Amino acid sequence: MSSEVKVTLPDGSSLPVESNSSVYEVAGKIGKKLQKAALVAAVDDRLTDLSFRLAGDAGLKLFTFASAEGKDAFRHSASHLMAHAVKRLFPGAKLAVGPAIDNGFYYDFEVERNFTPEDLRRIEEEMAKIVAEDLELVREEVTRRKAIDYFSSIGESYKVELLDDLPDGTISLYRQGEFADLCRGPHLPRTSYIKAFKLLSIAGAYWRGDEKRPMLQRIYGTAWPTKDELDAYLKHLEEVEKRDHRKLGRELDLYSVHEETGPGLILWHPKGARLRHIIESFWREEHYKNGYDLVYSPHIGRSTLWETSGHLGFYSENMYSPMDIDGQDYYVKPMNCPFHLMIYKSRGWSYRDLPLRWAELGTVYRYERSGVLHGLLRVRGFTQDDAHLMCRPDQMPEEIDRVLAFCLYMLRSFGFSDFKVYLATRPGEKFVGDEAMWSEATQALKESVERAGIDYELDDGGGAFYGPKIDIKIKDALGREWQCSTIQFDFNMPERFDVTYVGSDGQKHRPYMIHRALLGSIERFVGVLVEHYAGKFPLWLSPVQVALLTVVSEAADHTVRLRDELMRGGLRAEADLREETIGYKIRDAIEKKVPYIGVIGRKEVESGTVSVRRRGETSSRTMPVDEFTALLRAEAAGKA
RNA sequence: GCCCACGUAGCUCAGUCGGUAGAGCAUUUGCAUGGUAAGCAAAAGGUCACCAGUUCGAUUCUGGUCGUGGGCUCCA
């Protein structure tokens, strides 16, 4: 007997359909176009394939590629498609995991020999064949026992390991042709849906991210519903390359690294140093305004210091070998905190003296494994915008509020508004301090973030062993997140250095210590800053704010005088007196992304004017010199 | 550290199926004093990352080292 069921759509309307209709059939009733575009669905908020059959009344939502759910399923099916192709070409390959990721997918395999770029081409061709075969993706549900038997029988040991960790119950497999994979789904209906894809790279990846487990071969790819969208994405990747801070750093002559000087060690050129100076000056001023004091500490410290701090115990892998000075071991500092604690210990403190806020642009050196170095974003020598706050327990919540507000103010001053905030809590096993302290501090951090009204993610167990923390990460041009700001409790150092203050009760008490960096490190921050602005810095940050270009040689004296006048007024100006055509000099200044170009020829010399051309504009405006300086001053005063 | 790729002039890149290399831009010089994205010409510039091996001969082939890029792990 055929009965009807009621399907409720997202807009609230309902549709009577025959019982046991597939989602795909229902989609057809709503519209042919939607039926064609739909990839997966949610029935009563549970994601399903389009082949899912509706047995009773249900809410239905269809997802096309426009939705996150649609994209995810699309890329996930593409990863199955690739795995299928790999299994055809490399029957001995063992499957590990293959999820969808932003803009694409990957799949990990264990193979006899490593993949080569030539293999990628062959795999792509095989994928195209499977797409042409238009295979149906069929969901099968079996018991866990049966799934384990099946994957054991075909030698898929990684799948068996995954199954071992799954709770007992029904397991779903997806089969397309002769290929089947353990998978929760949902998936696209047929392989022919995957019209455009490209395999992008080969990488090694440890099984389950554990470097003690075997290294597998990972293939990354991207997939799109149409070739146009694929091409647009590939084009986008090329555009992203143009704002890469390593490329811009060279083009704008900001900094360099050399094999001769050593990897991960940055040489700051005059323009980069100027940018740094601007950032650091602003930073210092703001710190004084915000109730901090500045301190300085040396680059090296005696081994006894690092024994007391515990760094030789828990951080030695990141520290460089000691140097011998008069028979004593000294270490180059990987952190500034021990020095700041020694400053604290140089005298006694009353509860009335707290809180103390000591900041330092402290240059530290850390051993980073060679494979992780990356331009300015991951280096071996860097300057942290460090500070340590020492406060009484009762002052702690306010101090966190203050430091968080200060942090957001700094980031926003540099134009960042799109960052991610993480609250990292106590690690599972290894931690110091008692649980009461941890929960008090974690709660304080949480409340502070919530009071500030910012979205955050919980990084459960992601705290340092010495305390919970708030981390703020900023994305680079490729969308990769880099940790910049961090606000960390430290329950370890105050104990180790036995720092105290005398309370109103006349007794010694242990202060709370908060370690924080707002920009993170100057190196990393400049790296993300360059990418954020694509090298087009706002006026207040531009190493060169104005390029004055002469049209004819006889304008040189006048131009030099104007440049000097601007510089006396605190503006950063350069004069290009080269005997080149004005077109050549303009092009040069544009390529260096100078915010303002001032052209000076005979007319301007005679009338005391300058022909001003703003970055990004193709027209110019002639104005009196005074008007020009006033305009520059006004703009440089703002942080926009 | 591990996996894949790469390393030719300051930069961007050709090239050599083994006979020690080329372009454009940048640089220097000469001419042109040119009005809003490259004026014309010439010169100079390279241990083809480094070290071994194979070879009559290696920038090219093989191995190792160093460095860079994309990942993994880890972190500001």
Image (tube, rainbow, N blue to C red):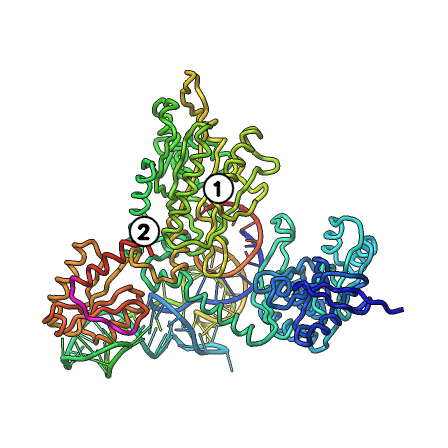
Q: Residue at x 50, y 31 (%)?
A: A491
Marks counted in the figure total 2
The 10 Å Cα crowd at callout 1, few under 14, some 14 to 19, many 20 or more, is: few
Secondary element at image label 1: helix
Q: Residue at x 39, y 41 (%)?
A: A386
The 10 Å Cα crowd at callout 2, few under 14, some 14 to 19, many 20 or more, is: many
Q: Quadrant of residue A56?
A: bottom right
- Confirm whether residue A219 shows in the render: no
Image quadrant containing the N terminus of chain A: bottom right
Q: Which residue is mark 2?
A: A276
- Confirm whether residue A256 shows in the render: yes
The kind of residue tagged 1 is Arg
Q: Nearer the viewer, residue B22 or A58?
A: A58
Would you say A555 lies left or right of A189 here?
left
- Determine the residue located farthest toward the front in the rendered image: A13
A36 part of magenta stretch: no
Q: Earlier in the sequence, mark 1 or mark 2?
A: 2
> Where residue A355 appears, x then y in whole percent?
38, 30
Q: Nearer the viewer, residue A26 or A390?
A: A26
A620 part of magenta stretch: yes
Q: Quadrant of residue A92?
A: bottom right
| Mark 1–mark 2 distance (CA, rounded to whole Å) | 32 Å
Q: Residue at x 43, y 27 (%)?
A: A392
Letter of the chain that mark 2 sits on in the rendering: A
Letter of the chain that mark 1 sits on in the rendering: A
Q: Which residue is mark 1?
A: A451
Please give the range of residues in magenta.
A618-626
Q: Residues at badges 1 and 2 in contact (C-beta under 8 Å)? A: no
Secondary element at image label 2: helix
> Where residue A132 appears, x then y in whole percent?
69, 78
The kind of residue tagged 2 is Arg
The mark closer to the camera, 1 or 2, is 1
